[in-house]
Amino acid sequence: MTNGSSAEHFERAKAVLRGETYKTSDLGVRKVLGFVFSFDGSNSWITRDALELRWVGENRRRRHKYFLDLAPGVVWDVMSRMGVSEILRPTVGYLAPDRAQLHPLVGDKEDHVAWVAPSEDQIQIMVRPLAGRSPPKAMPVPDSGPWTLPDPLPPWAPADPVYLELTNGLECQRCGRIGESYRELSDGYLVCGSCGCSFRP
Ligand SMILES: [Zn+2]
């Protein structure tokens, strides 16, 4: 799912990583941050197409997609919690709640650590519980020791559903229900959770 200015939002998120100032109070960003900082942690991928998020945990195999306009705000808040003004290479740091820019709508009750790994085509954000360790000051991701990149999540099965999340809602073209979450088929059609019909947005 893309919209006309996806590339622009992706470039903006990369500019925030390079230290460009940014500010938002967007409700959608606060919603997504609640998922990013969920209890067991999450992996998020920001690309030119979408912001995709997957929770850590065996029974949370859904993949959620969000529009890219939320990405710069997510990067901005994560960097602020880490206490850094730029991230040019993979960086790990404690997410200090007292440095937060935004108050997520849900979650955000646990101490977390984030790894932010930027590349040309992707910004990956991995969040895990601090779990009794002493919080790391932001630093380049080391090759060894407790702050190396977290274990990768299990691979996707082809049938694992993808859900497109619309923080401002979208009207089903068949039944008219305003939904915030639609299952997205591989051809881009969306399935309404209310009437079961699919339509092209
Ligand atoms: Zn419907």
Image (cartoon, rainbow, N blue to C red):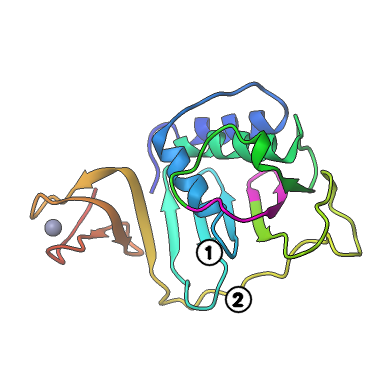
Measuring 55% from the left and 52% from the top, which residue is drawn there? 36
Vertical order, 58 against 29 (above or below): below
Measuring 59% from the left and 59% from the top, which residue is drawn there? 43
Vertical order, 198 against 71 (above or below): below
Q: Which mark is residue 55?
A: 1
**Discs 2/1, front:** 1
Pick the front one: 128 or 188 = 128
- Name the secondary structure under disc 1: strand
Pick the front one: 106 or 70 = 106
Residue 40 in sight in this render:
yes
Whether residue 110 sits left or right of residue 91 in the image: it is: left
Picture quadrant of ligand 1: bottom left
Q: Amino acid at mark 1?
A: Trp
The picture quadrant where one finds residue 120 is top right
Return the x and y of residue 103 as percentages of the image width and height: 51, 38
Residue 50 in sight in this render:
no
Return the x and y of residue 69 as percentages of the image width and height: 45, 35
Return the x and y of residue 81 as percentages of the image width and height: 68, 39
Q: Which mark is residue 43?
A: none
- Give the extent of the magenta segment: 107-124
Q: Amino acid at mark 2?
A: Pro
Cα gap from disc 2 to disc 1, whole angstroms = 11 Å
Measuring 83% from the left and 59% from the top, which residue is drawn there? 147
Whether residue 61 sits left or right of residue 124 in the image: it is: left
Vertical order, 16 against 116 (above or below): above
Find disc 2 in the rendering and name its residue.
154
Q: Residue furthest right?
A: 144
Return the x and y of residue 67 as percentages of the image width and height: 42, 43
The question of residue 113 being in magenta is answered with yes
* Mark 1 residue crowding within 10 angstroms, few (<14) / some (14–19) / many (20+): many
Vertical order, 149 against 97 (above or below): below
